[in-house]
Image (cartoon, rainbow, N blue to C red):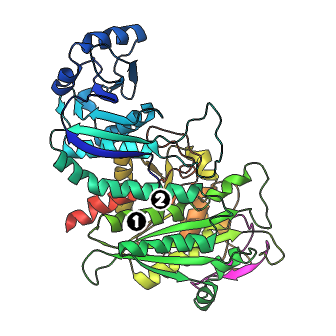
């Protein structure tokens, strides 16, 4: 996994060269260490701030080249806003703001890890470092030439000066593994579909064995024996056969019920026989954002040695329209034995998830299951690109996801479920249809999935608006966002590892 910057921790000291970055509040107040490092240059900073109307708003920056009174080549003052209102996620965003100001020529960067109220705590410095790495990520491996005005990947060494470097490094170690998981998820979503098809995706997931994850890959023969007719029906039109990958991290007590995370992995979605319009179809390489998140999450949990048992399961297919593709009107039998009438072959993700959810519920008996899927355009109509849609049969799980979403900035919004919606997916020929009417499309999709969880506490996250192509923000400038890795890692850490 590529890293645009290298981040480390050093003791407080004034740098002799390179770029210096310090923080101030909305009153242009600096901490004691920053004040000492700036020395007589503070007067220059205040003059420049007045001239540019820089007021220390959170994430804003004042950039000075060859500042008078300092030996450094460049001074960047980053606003932290009201010091009393800073939360952990704000530190992550401040790190992103720092990375956003580092240029291609900034080879050596020192950041004074201090807020106006005092030195950053180790956890705060770790969050700052995470934000720097997340923002600096760039996917450009397939570019052989760059335009003159196109920024390439930054190659910089960033040192965060803190009161206790050892403590900051210790705090950042698990956070760094989570960042690695996010970057892995972004890499998978960003890859082109001729590179990342089901077999290749499965091979990349299998690399988690190096971290101690048990990985089982189910091929077409194995899935046929398991009677996964819903998933196999989606993949039968592709030259690339489908795969199901089961990943297990055993970090908890032996025989303790695992937690389970399930991801939709449609490596490319043409819509099948119900083919999509050509406009923006290239974006459908990201229709495996849920599976990418699960792989990234399993990486994070295993790398940081999470003290829980976790199952990660992904269904990998391509939805292609060849002569063997399934048709509208076909009826398939899912692993659960329930039959499904295919109304629209572009409602394929729920078919993939149906068999994988049932497999996990029956085989692993988890405490709960959370599935992630770029499932419906309807959720984007309802929520835009700021929130993922949350559907759940368990209030406690839904509340925990909502709370963690607010804390991590990967926000979710709970949507309704109810038997009234079942009427839309009732079929006169089979047990159910794979899609209902246009109205409430994301709800009926979730209602469909609920039929395959077998009473297990479950939550469905519709991440169609957040996993790919979402607006760029302080900590992500990539098309693939890696959404869900930090959210679910925090869910595991706060509510399940904390009990150990």
Residue 391 seen by the camera? yes
* SS for callout 2: helix
Quadrant in which the C terminus is drawn: bottom left
Residue situated in front as seen by the camera: 425 or 481: 481
Residue situated in front as seen by the camera: 440 or 295: 295
In the rendered image, residue 418, in percent from the top left (x then y), is placed at 53, 63
In magenta stretch: residue 345:
yes
| Farthest residue, direction bottom | 225
Question: Contact (CB < 8 A) between labels 1 and 2?
Answer: yes
**196, above or below 175, in the image:** below
| Farthest residue, direction right | 323
In the rendered image, residue 432, in percent from the top left (x then y), is placed at 66, 74
The dominant secondary structure in magenta is loop
Structural crowding at the residue carrying mark 1, measured as other residues with C-alpha within 10 Å and reported as few (<14), some (14–19) or many (≥20): many
> What is the C-alpha distance between the residues marked 1 and 2?
8 Å
Residue 484 seen by the camera? no
Residue shown at the point (41%, 76%) measured from the top left: 209
Say which quarter of the image contains residue 122.
top left
Residue carrying label 1 = 299
Residue 490 shown left or right of residue 37 in the figure? right
In the rendered image, residue 243, in percent from the top left (x then y), is placed at 59, 77
Residue carrying label 2 = 184
**173, above or below 320, in the image:** above
- Give the label on residue 324, or none: none
Residue 20 shown left or right of residue 272 in the figure? left
User: Magenta span covers which residues?
Assistant: 327-347
Residue shown at the point (44%, 85%) measured from the top left: 363
Residue situated in front as seen by the camera: 414 or 259: 259
Say which quarter of the image contains residue 111.
top left
Structural crowding at the residue carrying mark 2, measured as other residues with C-alpha within 10 Å and reported as few (<14), some (14–19) or many (≥20): many
Residue shown at the point (52%, 67%) measured from the top left: 263
């Amino acid at each position: 996994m590529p890293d645009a910057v290298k981040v480390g921790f050093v003791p407080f000291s004034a740098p002799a060269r390179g770029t210096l970055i310090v923080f101030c509040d909305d009153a242009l107040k600096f901490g004691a260490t920053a004040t000492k490092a700036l020395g007589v240059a503070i007067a220059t900073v205040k003059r420049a701030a007045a001239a540019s109307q820089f007021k220390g708003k959170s994430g804003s920056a004042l950039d000075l080249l060859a500042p008078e009174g300092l030996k450094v080549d460049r001074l960047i003052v980053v606003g932290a806003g009201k010091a009393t209102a800073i939360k952990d996620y704000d530190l992550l965003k401040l790190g992103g703001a720092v990375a956003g100001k580092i240029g291609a020529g900034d080879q050596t960067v020192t950041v004074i890890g201090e807020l106006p109220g005092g030195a950053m705590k180790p956890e705060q410095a770790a969050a700052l470092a995470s934000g720097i790495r997340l923002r600096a990520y760039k996917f450009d491996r397939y570019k052989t030439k760059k335009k003159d005005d196109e920024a390439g990947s930054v190659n910089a060494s960033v040192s965060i000066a803190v009161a206790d470097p050892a403590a900051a490094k210790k705090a950042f170690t698990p956070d760094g593994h989570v960042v690695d998981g996010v970057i892995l998820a972004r890499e998978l979503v960003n890859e082109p579909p001729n590179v990342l098809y089901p077999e290749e995706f499965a091979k990349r997931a299998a690399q988690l064995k190096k971290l101690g994850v048990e990985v089982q890959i189910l091929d077409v023969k194995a899935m046929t024996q398991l009677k996964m007719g819903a998933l196999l029906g989606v993949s039968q039109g592709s030259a690339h056969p489908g795969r199901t990958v089961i990943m297990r991290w055993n970090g908890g007590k032996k025989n303790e019920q695992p937690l389970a995370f399930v991801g939709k992995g449609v490596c490319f979605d043409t819509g099948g026989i119900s083919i999509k319009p050509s406009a923006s179809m290239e974006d459908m390489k990201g229709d495996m954002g849920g599976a990418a998140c699960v792989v990234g999450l399993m990486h994070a949990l295993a790398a940081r040695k999470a003290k829980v048992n976790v199952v990660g399961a992904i269904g990998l297919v391509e939805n292609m329209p060849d002569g063997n593709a399934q048709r509208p009107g076909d009826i398939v039998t899912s692993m659960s034995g329930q039959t499904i009438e295919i109304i629209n072959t572009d409602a394929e993700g729920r078919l993939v998830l149906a068999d994988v959810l049932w497999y996990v519920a029956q085989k692993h008996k988890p405490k709960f299951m959370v599935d992630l899927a770029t499932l419906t355009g309807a959720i984007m109509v309802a929520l835009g690109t700021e929130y993922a849609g949350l559907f759940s049969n368990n209030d406690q799980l839904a509340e925990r996801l909502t709370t963690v979403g607010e804390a991590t900035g990967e926000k979710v919004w709970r949507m309704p479920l109810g038997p009234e919606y079942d009427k839309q997916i009732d079929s006169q020929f089979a047990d159910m249809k794979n899609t209902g009417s246009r109205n409430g499309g994301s709800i009926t999709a979730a209602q469909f999935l609920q039929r395959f969880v077998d009473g297990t506490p479950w939550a469905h996250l519709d991440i169609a608006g957040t996993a790919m192509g979402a607006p760029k923000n302080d900590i992500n400038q990539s098309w693939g966002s890696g959404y869900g890795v930090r959210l679910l890692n925090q869910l595991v850490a706060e509510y399940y590892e904390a009990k150990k």
